[in-house]
Image (tube, helix red, strand yellow):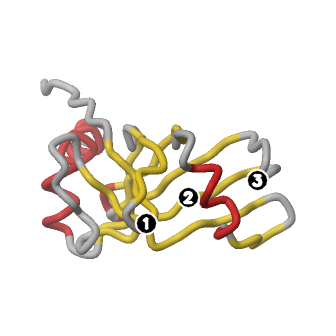
Amino acid sequence: MFRWVSLLFQIYYEDKLIGHSQLEKGDPPMGVAHGEFLPNKAFDEVKKHFDHIEKDIWRLENLTLKTNNRISADRDFDVGILAYESLEDPFFLEVSAFAKVSEAYEALFLHHIKAYEEHYKD
């Protein structure tokens, strides 16, 4: 058995910290980690940069992901936020990190890989 690791990732728009996420869910075969986005006060300033992509969905891309110890993973991941129902008062904010290379995913999300392997063993 393995121990779960709970990291708090920092999400940046340009050089501005706009919130955090644990990126608590993962899809290792696809190289994706995602989770609830917890905005801070600076998030309100970047709402104008969201694209309205569907009826009740807005998207913000080209974000930077940093770890607890401030290691930047922006070269290894494409990071974006989706807002559902309303941009001003969203029902849910989700952030996703798509790994560009499998080694990057393994380095930050080994716990997702282990959980996936445990679920599908035998």
Task: Give the residue type at disc 2.
Answer: Ile
Residue 59 visible to an observer of this rendering: yes
Residue topped by disc 1? 63
Residue for point 24% across, 36% down: 118
In this rendering, the label closer to the viewer, 2 or 1: 1
Query: How far from the left and from the top, in percent, is residue 95?
Result: 50, 53
Which mark, by number, is residue 81? 2
User: Do the CB atoms of the residues marked 1 and 3 lie less than 8 Å apart?
Assistant: no
Residue for point 18% across, 64% down: 104
Q: CA distance from mark 2 to mark 1?
A: 8 Å
Q: CA distance from mark 3 to mark 2?
A: 11 Å
Q: CA distance from mark 1 to mark 3?
A: 17 Å
Left or right: residue 98 versus residue 82 is: left
Left or right: residue 19 versus residue 76 is: right
Q: Residues within 10 Å of mark 2 (few under 14, many from 20)?
A: many
Mark sitting earlier along the chain (2/1) = 1
Quarter holding the N terminus is top left
Residue topped by disc 3? 87
Task: Give the residue type at disc 1.
Answer: Leu
Mark sitting earlier along the chain (3/2) = 2
Say which quarter of the image contains residue 106: bottom left
**Label 3's element?**
loop
Task: Give the residue type at disc 3.
Answer: Leu
Query: How far from the left and from the top, in percent, is residue 19?
Result: 46, 44
User: Do the CB atoms of the residues marked 2 and 1 lie less than 8 Å apart?
Assistant: yes
User: Do the CB atoms of the residues marked 3 and 2 lie less than 8 Å apart?
Assistant: no
Quarter holding the C terminus is top left
Which mark, by number, is residue 3? none
Say which quarter of the image contains residue 46: bottom right
Query: How far from the left and from the top, in percent, is residue 62?
Result: 45, 73
Residue 122 visible to an observer of this rendering: no
Q: Residues within 10 Å of mark 1 (few under 14, many from 20)?
A: many
